């Protein structure tokens, strides 16, 4: 059931969360499937609805920095600087967890992922929840495990069914999930690239941001598990292939009239001479990383819904601002 996110609908959703039910929640990144973060039974239903393995931890969404001490045992100075710079916004911080709190949400790990979303509907819901005694809301992306993340209320309904209460907050502005920084290993480690870039993080906290492959002797501790960081993820039914612009033209020309049920997301529309025929569904890839991030999941989902068997994607340049989009595409193709 999709509800326009009026004040009354937000109260209804907050009450549903307090009562242990699930809610489809708009955020500035993607839609989330929300449950009361401290209600382990409610959180367990998220794993069932998504078909997600229970040891994969979920992100807890909070109304403001004030709720952080309710979940985190300790906040390093660099994490504090990142909250000050980017919250509310598309940044998740992994922090040492307060023992006994949000155990199911943390997938049993000793850490907790915290994020303060900026979407006005998410903010209003989290504030209303607080007033009802719900301290935070666990919400993974509202898709079946391993599939494409939803960026509209209709996507959520098609993933999870008509019974779920979904707040409609419009089309998600960012379009890919939050940047995740692990703050439990003494130095910031990038677990998932996103709209907020590595360079922005480094500038805001004055530290080097390590990658997942950072040497053990630098960090001293093993990396946590992160399902959004599995090699294969975000997969449509169609097979995704990443190519250069010239590869695309050569392969289209080689197929000629045999090109059929083919989706294509590229910067330039190929001409008929270059092999664009009626069997090819072309979508324009935006020239900026921000616009392409906004579009990537909805383009994959839309082409998939039209029954194409392959989606050819022009791989964007290997530059810092494209890191988030390239990451999602590489895992959609894996
Ligand atoms: O933008 C987003 O972050 C969206 C919206 C709904 O807020 N949420 C989202 O959640 O992407 P999800 O569950 O699909 O991705 C959460 C990622 C996973 O890779 C998970 O493993 C990681 O965060 N994560 C959460 N808690 C963690 C923890 N304690 N340690 C390590 N990774 C954690
Ligand atoms: Mg996800």
Image: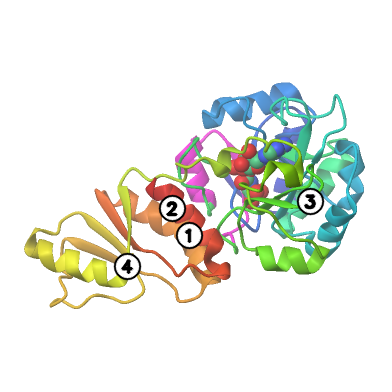
**Residue identified by numbered label 4:** 244
Q: Secondary structure at mark 1?
A: helix
For the question of whether residue 31 can be seen, the reply is yes
Q: Which residues are magenta?
A: 153-172
Q: Quadrant of residue 176?
A: bottom right
Which quadrant of the rendered structure holds the N terminus? top right
Asked if 281 appears above or below 22 in the picture, the reply is: below
Where residue 83 appears, x then y in whole percent? Answer: 83, 57
Label 4 and label 2: CA atoms lie apart by 13 Å
Asked if 33 appears above or below 197 in the picture, the reply is: above
Asked if 144 appears above or below 317 in the picture, the reply is: above
Between disc 1 and disc 3, whose residue precedes? 3
Label 2 and label 1: CA atoms lie apart by 6 Å
Please, which residue is most extreme toward the front here?
217
Residue at 69% from the left image edge and 35% from the top image edge: 222
Q: Which colouring convention does the figure follow?
A: rainbow
Where residue 330 appears, x then y in whole percent? Answer: 43, 53
**Residue identified by numbered label 2:** 330
Please, which residue is most extreme toward the left here?
257
Label 3 and label 2: CA atoms lie apart by 26 Å
Where residue 92 appears, x then y in whole percent? Answer: 72, 50
Which quadrant of the rendered structure holds the C terminus? top left
**Residue identified by numbered label 1:** 326
**Residue identified by numbered label 3:** 187
């Amino acid at each position: 059931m999709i509800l326009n996110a009026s004040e009354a609908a937000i109260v209804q959703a907050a009450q549903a969360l307090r009562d242990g039910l699930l809610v489809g929640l708009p955020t500035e990144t993607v839609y989330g499937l929300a449950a009361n973060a401290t209600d382990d039974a409610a959180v367990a239903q998220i794993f069932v609805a998504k078909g997600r393995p229970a040891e994969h931890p979920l992100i807890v969404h909070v109304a403001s920095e004030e709720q952080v001490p309710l979940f985190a045992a300790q906040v390093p100075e660099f994490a504090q600087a990142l909250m000050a710079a980017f919250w509310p916004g598309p940044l998740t911080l992994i922090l040492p967890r307060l023992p006994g709190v949000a155990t199911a949400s943390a997938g049993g790990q000793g850490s907790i992922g915290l994020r303060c979303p900026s979407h006005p509907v998410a903010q209003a819901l989290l504030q209303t929840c607080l007033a009802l005694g719900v301290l935070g809301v666990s919400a993974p992306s509202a898709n079946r495990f391993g599939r494409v993340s939803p960026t509209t209320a209709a996507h959520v309904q098609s993933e999870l069914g008509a019974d779920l209460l979904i707040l409609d907050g419009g089309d998600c502005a960012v379009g890919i999930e939050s940047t995740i920084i692990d703050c439990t290993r003494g130095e910031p480690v990038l677990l998932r690239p996103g709209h907020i870039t590595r360079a922005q993080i480094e500038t805001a906290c004055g530290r080097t941001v390590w990658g997942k492959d950072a040497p053990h002797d630098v960090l001293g501790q093993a990396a946590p598990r992160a399902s959004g960081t599995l090699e294969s993820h975000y997969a449509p039914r169609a097979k995704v292939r990443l190519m250069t612009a010239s590869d695309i033209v050569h392969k289209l020309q080689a197929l000629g009239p045999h090109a059929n049920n083919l989706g294509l997301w590229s910067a330039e529309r190929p001409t008929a001479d270059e092999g664009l025929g009626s069997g090819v569904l072309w979508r324009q890839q935006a020239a900026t990383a921000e616009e392409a991030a906004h579009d990537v999941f909805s383009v994959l989902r839309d082409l998939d819904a039209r029954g194409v068997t392959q989606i050819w994607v022009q791989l964007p340049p290997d530059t810092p601002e494209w890191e988030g989009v390239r990451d999602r595409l590489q895992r959609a193709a894996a």
